[in-house]
Image: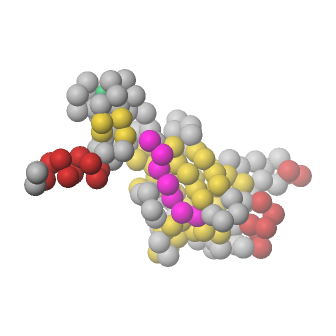
Amino acid sequence: MNNPESTYLTTQLKRICFICKSALVDDAIYCHRCGTKQPPPKLILRSEEQVFELQDASKVWIVGRTIPATGHIVDVDLGEAGGKLGVSRRHAELAFDEQNYQWTLRDASSQYGTFVDDQQVQPEVFIPLQAGQRVRFGGIEFSIELQY
Ligand SMILES: [Zn+2]
């Protein structure tokens, strides 16, 4: 009864292989059974007011403020209110790092900075994101979720 492996399995396994349906551990990239590389997780940014779901892991997502009058368009638009809360027009980028199989964040030299768990990140450097972290663009904060 006291088999540590079975305890591990029941508490850790939430994903299944999209090909053979074998159970996968949380952050497995390859299926241990059929060897298939799993599709990238969806990145979800969630606040009380807004939810952004980033499904397409093949593009770079721009976080900032869309300014219709100038044709400046971003993917994650923090809106007019964002300006008052210190969100730059082009504030940060989110991209999936295929090699390391993880979502990453880069501050685009924003005026008021980008923060992960209240720590300001260095501008222009991609850093890995993990589920459960809090990311703040200027004064607008989101929690990070990964959906496999
Ligand atoms: Zn499989």
Is 52 on the left-hand or right-hand side of 6?
A: right
Q: Residue furthest bottom?
A: 118
Judge by depth and name the residue closer to the eye, 131 or 61: 131
Residue at 58% across, 56% down: 45
Q: Residue furthest left?
A: 2
Q: Position of residue 8 (x, y in %)?
A: 21, 51
Specify whether residue 1 is painted magenta: no
Q: Taking the image as drawn, is residue 90 in sight?
A: no
Vertical placement of residue 97 versus 93, above or below: above
Asked which quadrant contains residue 112, the reply is: bottom right
* Figure quadrant of residue 79: bottom right
Image coords of residue 147 (percent x, y): 48, 46
Residue at 50% x, 76% y is: 118
Residue 89 pos. (x, y %): 72, 60
Front one among 38 and 20? 20
Picture quarter with the C terminus:
top left
Which residues are drawn in magenta? Answer: 142-148
Front one among 64 and 123? 64
Residue located 55% across and 51% down the image: 44
State which quadrant residue 16 falls in: top left
